[in-house]
Image (cartoon, grey):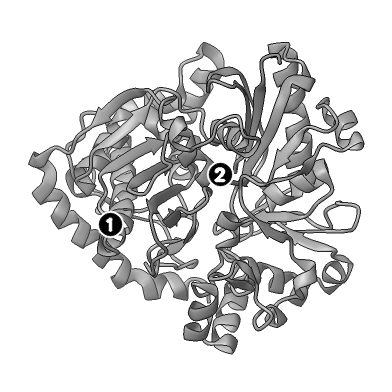
């Protein structure tokens, strides 16, 4: 038998990435392609499933094959991950009927979430579905379509998510993995991991929802039509796939109970693996991407998207320099924050520029830059943004600790890890050691690893740990502990005191 390869693909908020990995965990080739986040009005966030997802997938697959020279017949399996909870109604021919409604950064379904919580009852929903509805949940988004676009609802064969959309177009089968389905309130029965006959009636019939499977289950093979469109070989096995955060955790060896991943992406995402299913409300708990492993997870709405906003709006000359001279605009901007002291000379930022997911679950929360004076510079604002994200991360990690699990092995991943200052700031605020792996290509690498598990190239998730090499480690600086402990309280109080004003601005 010749050498075998695995193909991994991940679709994020602003770009898609792909890798081909050999059977020893070595990345042979990688590729990336940007796409546009569509914001048709405040509170809305959408992708075009064909132009952003499917066309992006086809482009990257062909680029990977062309650059590597790998024979498509030697690809043993395909794994796909995408952003969470991007609800997409499709017809019987796998064609989308509207743009996808994205995860928690799209807050249009806040009313529907409140209605479902009230109609079903929060305690009843928690008992059956594991959590109450938020704008992150599948159900409110589907109900928004039913309420506001009845013609779309009537034509829908299946309400799928981004990963399920892509795997369906490859294999002809509608599926969602258990890890992604943990956001499927109120329709999910999280104890049996099936659709609840009792609760689906509040949103849509179960036959309009995808089949729930394990992440590494081979759900089918590449069809003749998909092979012609993508350049893949007909008959190539495709696993169910998952959400980007789950795949990214695998990519850095977060595969056993006790492991933690902290992802610095467009949003922040935290995954803690456990050996049992626990109630960690308000954080999410449920099944992991690996069999017989469970998770406590949490996410924030703006992380890298906040630094992108700062770059695009307050550092346009650096962006121009990047285009003309190749000087990285982010690196240049972040350098300005290096000599700013801890606490940013009294400046605090609430990073709620797209509402907030956890732990406050407030889609109407607003970003705040508090404490400005004439001494403050652009560098102060950047450092305060790092700290604001750090305070939010700390609130989430504290809830994980309260659930009874230590934060011993924290692996940091994502684009934000390119800034050692940012990671050091978060370590100082949270009091945690963070380990950054050398290979940080992210979720697409994890997708290839999951495909290797799914098709039997590796037998155990523990084998993945042998593939992980460390780049650097950040340890908390005890000199900053007292100041940051004080500022954590100011951060929390600042939101509480301004919450009613934030909500009034939406009235």
Rendered image quadrant of residue 204 = bottom right
Residue drawn at (31%, 33%) of the image: 435
For disc 1, the marked residue is 405
Residue drawn at (45%, 63%) of the image: 284
Q: Are marks 1 and 2 in contact (CB under 8 Å)?
A: no
Label 1, secondary structure: give it: loop
Residue 422 shows in the view: yes
Residue drawn at (60%, 59%) of the image: 106
Above or below residue 402? Residue 303 is above
Q: Nearer the viewer, residue 416 or 263?
A: 263
Residue drawn at (62%, 70%) of the image: 109
Provide residue 269's location: percent of width, then percent of height: 44, 49
Q: Quick one: label 2, few (<14), some, or many (20+) residues within 10 Å? A: many
In the drawing, does residue 215 fall left or right of residue 419? right
Quarter of the image with the N terminus in it = top right
Provide residue 31's location: percent of width, then percent of height: 64, 23
For disc 2, the marked residue is 244
In the drawing, does residue 84 fall left or right of residue 489? right
Rounded to the nearest whole Å, what is the CA distance between mark 1 and mark 2? Answer: 23 Å
């Amino acid at each position: 038998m010749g050498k075998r390869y695995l193909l991994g693909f991940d679709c994020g908020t602003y770009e898609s990435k792909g890798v081909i990995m050999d059977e020893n965990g070595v990345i042979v080739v990688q590729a990336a392609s940007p796409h546009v986040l569509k914001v048709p009005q405040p509170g809305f966030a959408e992708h075009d499933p064909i132009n952003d997802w499917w066309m992006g997938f086809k482009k990257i697959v062909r680029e990977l094959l062309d650059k590597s020279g790998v024979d498509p017949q030697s690809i043993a399996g395909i794994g796909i991950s995408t952003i969470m909870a991007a609800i997409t109604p499709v017809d019987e021919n796998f064609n989308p009927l509207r743009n996808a409604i994205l995860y928690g950064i799209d807050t249009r379904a806040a009313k529907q979430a409140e209605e479902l919580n009230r109609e079903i009852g929060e305690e009843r929903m928690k008992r059956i579905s594991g959590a109450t509805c938020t704008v992150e949940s599948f159900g409110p988004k589907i109900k928004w379509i039913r309420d506001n676009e009845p013609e779309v609802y009537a034509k829908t064969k299946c309400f799928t998510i981004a990963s399920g959309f892509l795997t369906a177009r490859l294999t002809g089968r509608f599926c969602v993995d258990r890890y992604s389905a943990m956001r499927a309130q109120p329709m999910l029965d999280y104890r049996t991991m099936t659709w609840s006959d009792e609760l689906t009636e509040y949103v849509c019939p179960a036959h309009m929802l995808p089949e729930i499977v394990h992440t590494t289950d081979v759900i089918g093979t590449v069809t003749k039509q998909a092979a012609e469109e993508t350049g893949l070989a007909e008959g190539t096995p495709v696993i169910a796939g998952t959400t980007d955060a789950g795949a990214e955790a695998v990519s850095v060896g977060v595969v056993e109970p006790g492991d933690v991943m902290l992802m610095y992406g467009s949003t922040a995402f935290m995954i803690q693996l456990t050996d049992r299913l626990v109630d960690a409300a308000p954080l999410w708990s449920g099944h992991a991407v690996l069999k017989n492993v469970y998770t406590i997870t949490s996410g924030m709405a703006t992380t890298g998207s906040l630094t992108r906003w700062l770059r695009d709006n307050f550092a346009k000359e650096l962006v121009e320099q990047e285009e003309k001279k190749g000087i990285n605009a982010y690196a240049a901007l972040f350098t300005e924050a290096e000599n700013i002291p801890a606490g940013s000379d009294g400046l605090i930022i609430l990073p709620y520029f797209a509402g907030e997911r956890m732990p406050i679950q407030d889609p109407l929360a607003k970003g705040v830059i508090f404490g400005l004076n004439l001494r403050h510079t652009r560098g102060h604002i950047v450092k305060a943004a790092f700290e604001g994200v750090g305070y939010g991360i700390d609130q989430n990690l504290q809830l994980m600790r309260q659930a009874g699990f230590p934060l011993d092995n924290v692996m940091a991943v994502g684009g934000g890890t390119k800034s050692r200052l940012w990671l050091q700031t978060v370590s100082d605020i949270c009091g945690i050691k963070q380990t950054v792996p050398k290979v940080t290509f992210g979720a697409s690498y994890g997708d290839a690893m999951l495909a290797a598990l799914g098709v039997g190239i590796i037998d155990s998730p523990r084998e993945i740990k042998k593939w992980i090499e460390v780049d650097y480690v950040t340890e908390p600086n005890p000199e900053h502990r007292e100041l940051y402990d004080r500022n954590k309280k100011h951060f929390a109080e600042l939101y509480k005191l301004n919450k009613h004003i934030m909500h009034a601005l939406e009235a």
